[in-house]
Image (cartoon, helix red, strand yellow):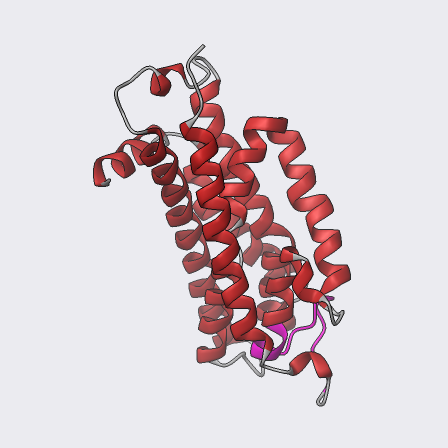
Amino acid sequence: MGRYFQAENLKLKRAFARKLILFAPLATLLLTWSLAAIWFQVNAFNWWYILLMPGLIALICTLSDQKETKKLEYRGVLSLPVSLKKVWIAKNMTLLFYAALSNLVLLIGILLGGSFVPNPLPFGASCLGMFLIFISSLWQIPLCLFLSRKVGMVGTVILQVGIGDVLGILFATKSNWWLCPYSWTARMITPVLGILPNGTLAPSGDPLLNPSVVPIGIALSLVLFALLLLATTVWFSRQEAR
């Protein structure tokens, strides 16, 4: 399996997808600092999980897919004596690794920036918050890779960032928040960091501060990721070279 992972990573060696690992979090940090330095940490977290993280996943997935389809339409893979299941899993794991690195870069920037703002977010809560953002976004990787094959880059970005964000914000404050996967991040972040989905700080006693949603959100995220990875792996393994 390690060779499959190395092969997928090598395919993206000079691709723009790799540059996004640094560009996306750095752009988030610079933008939030320049617009409102006093709320730098709060805005960086909020903008990241609401808009920029979903956009990053959509782009790295579609760019990865384009590396295969631009010239050969996956014939370079489908015609080889390799396990298509392992190819697909390795592709997902590679992009998962990229997403983790991007989240780590943002976390380091947020923690460093906290030294220059009043009332910085607690270190432990910030680390936990970033971990939850990552865990609750895992399922989007196999989904976006699948969408890229079906509707292309524009369609994937619209579904992921446009429709997904709207649904996530609408469901995040509802009692049935668990029905919409795009709302899971926002719902879990509130009790951990005290940041509401609209980017403001939650007042004391706000029902959204109930921490019981965190283990529920983690479990739902991991189960959905496993299901989507399994389903898309089976689908990809049935592809045939044309």
Q: Residue at x 56, y 31 (%)?
A: 148
Towards the viewer: 88 or 108: 88
Point out residue 15 in the picture as x, y percentages from the top left corner: 41, 30
Point out residue 186 in the picture as x, y percentages from the top left corner: 64, 65
Majority secondary structure of magenta residues: loop
The residues colored magenta run 189-203
Q: Is residue 92 left or right of residue 39?
A: left
Farthest residue, direction left: 3
Q: Is residue 97 left or right of residue 138?
A: left
Q: Is the residue 146 above or below the residue 32 in the image?
A: above
Q: Residue at x 35, y 29 (%)?
A: 84
Q: Residue at x 60, y 30 (%)?
A: 153
Q: Is the residue 203 above or below the residue 163 in the image?
A: below
Question: In the picture, which quadrant includes the C terminus?
Answer: top left
Point out residue 222 in the picture as x, y percentages from the top left corner: 47, 59
Q: Is residue 187 left or right of residue 29?
A: right
Farthest residue, direction bottom: 205
Q: Is residue 160 visible?
A: yes
Question: In the picture, which quadrant includes the N terminus?
Answer: top left
